């Protein structure tokens, strides 16, 4: 039988690549549902090309516009914030690909987990914010989480070489972003243009800034802790600017197993869809004779303070990670809007963590409350800074 797939966030980079992968895989893979927030023109184009049974738009203001664009098609339009949950819980869906930035997709992801579906997770937030809840629900329902981001997909693939009990440590690799060789002093005057100039990957502005601060790797530390059920002390980060070795696993006998590939998101997307099988696909094949030298170095924990914070947050558990993630998202928005400096991003995150009283054993509602509190705190601090600057 065909694998029936829903894509939450189909108009983003991961969503578009997922549709390319599914189209290339051909028979045996069917797009049942797609959704987006406001990009209704592209969503309509995707609906006409892939002919899903359901199309969702999470912003209720755009439902009418979508209906005008695809009202002639034989499909059901779902609208509003609950549309993602409706799609994720559809009986006709086997695999849910999630590529929704932020905490917005959490209810849908937990809904899919409750139904025992395979979750192909591209964004970090579900496991960062609600890792404990999600893992518990997946174990109860018999579902599965397969990572789509290149680093965690690499770890998942490498871990097939042994049992979880035989893992000594996992090593997340990072390109180092545009400031790999910068000092803490160097980054104090970083411009938006410099922060968005990633040397390897073409990504959206938010994730590109996260790469520049290495917050993306900090979040991946927390994500890996839950995804692989491993103590945070057994998770390391290495800078690997060539971005060929996507991550490594060291086993207790001293063997190190790595997954290598070109910087192409189609490969981890496809593996999440075809697992446990491998099939020919559209990802570019790696030619080792053309890669040259592969280098590795330890990150400067002073320059990239987000990494040190991630270990503290992972140990604290509970609501700490929700605050960590939300404060960063809100601060990056302020930086992209030009209201704060690059160096202020981490300062605002640290402020929120210092002010927050961590609660453990919490529900999704309490995690979302912590998320909302951190966002409001960052917004208020940014407003205060603007007022002070205008007076001076």
Image: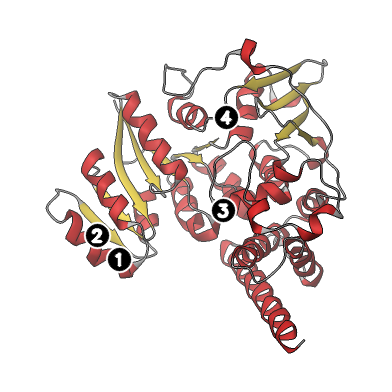
Pointers 1 and 2 in contact (CB under 8 A)? yes
Label 1, on which residue? 62
- The image position of residue 68, as x and y in percent, is 17, 61
The answer for how far apart the CA atoms under marks 3 and 1 are is: 24 Å
Answer few, some or many: residues within 10 Å of disc 2's Cα (few below 14, many 20 plus, some between 14 and 19): many
The answer for how far apart the CA atoms under marks 1 and 4 are is: 34 Å
Label 2, on which residue? 66
Can residue 180 be seen here? yes
* Residue at image coords 35%, 55%: 86
Answer few, some or many: residues within 10 Å of disc 4's Cα (few below 14, many 20 plus, some between 14 and 19): some
Label 4, on which residue? 263
Label 3, on which residue? 205
Mark 3 vs mark 2: in front: 3
The answer for how far apart the CA atoms under marks 3 and 2 are is: 26 Å
The answer for how far apart the CA atoms under marks 4 and 3 are is: 18 Å
Q: Quadrant of residue 234?
A: top right
């Amino acid at each position: 039988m065909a694998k029936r797939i829903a894509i939450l966030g189909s108009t983003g980079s991961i969503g578009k690549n997922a549709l390319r992968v599914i189209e290339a895989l051909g028979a045996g893979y069917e797009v049942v549902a797609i959704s987006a927030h406001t990009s209704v023109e592209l969503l309509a184009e995707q609906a006409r090309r892939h002919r899903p049974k359901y199309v969702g738009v999470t912003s209720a203001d755009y439902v009418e516009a979508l209906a005008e664009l695809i009202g002639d098609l034989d499909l059901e339009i779902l609208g509003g914030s609950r549309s993602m949950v409706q799609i994720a819980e559809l009986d006709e869906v086997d695999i849910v690909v999630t590529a929704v930035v932020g905490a917005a997709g959490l209810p849908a992801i937990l809904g899919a987990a409750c139904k025992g579906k395979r979750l192909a997770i591209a964004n970090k937030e579900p496991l960062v914010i609600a890792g404990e809840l999600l893992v518990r629900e997946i174990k109860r329902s018999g579902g599965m989480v397969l990572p789509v981001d290149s680093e965690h997909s690499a770890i998942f693939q490498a871990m097939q070489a042994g049992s979880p009990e035989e893992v000594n440590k996992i090593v997340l690799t990072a390109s180092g972003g545009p400031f790999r060789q910068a000092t803490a002093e160097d980054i104090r005057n970083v411009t938006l243009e410099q922060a968005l100039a990633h040397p390897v990957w073409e990504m959206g502005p938010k994730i590109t800034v996260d790469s520049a601060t290495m917050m993306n790797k900090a979040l991946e530390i927390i994500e890996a802790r839950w995804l692989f059920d491993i103590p945070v002390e057994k998770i390391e980060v290495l800078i690997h600017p060539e971005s060929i070795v996507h991550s490594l696993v060291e086993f207790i006998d001293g063997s190190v197993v790595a997954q290598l590939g070109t910087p192409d998101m189609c490969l981890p997307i496809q593996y999440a869809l075809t697992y446990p099988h491998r099939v020919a696909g559209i990802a570019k094949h790696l030619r080792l004779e053309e890669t040259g030298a592969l280098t590795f170095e330890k990150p400067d924990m002073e320059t990239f303070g987000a990494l040190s914070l991630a270990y503290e947050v992972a140990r604290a558990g509970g609501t700490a990670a929700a605050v960590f993630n939300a404060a960063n998202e809100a601060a990056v928005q302020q930086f992209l809007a030009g209201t704060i400096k690059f160096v202020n991003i981490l300062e605002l995150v640290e402020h929120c963590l210092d002010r927050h009283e961590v609660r453990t054993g919490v529900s999704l509602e309490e995690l979302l409350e912590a998320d909302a509190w951190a966002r409001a705190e960052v917004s208020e601090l940014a407003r205060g800074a603007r007022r002070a600057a205008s007076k001076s």
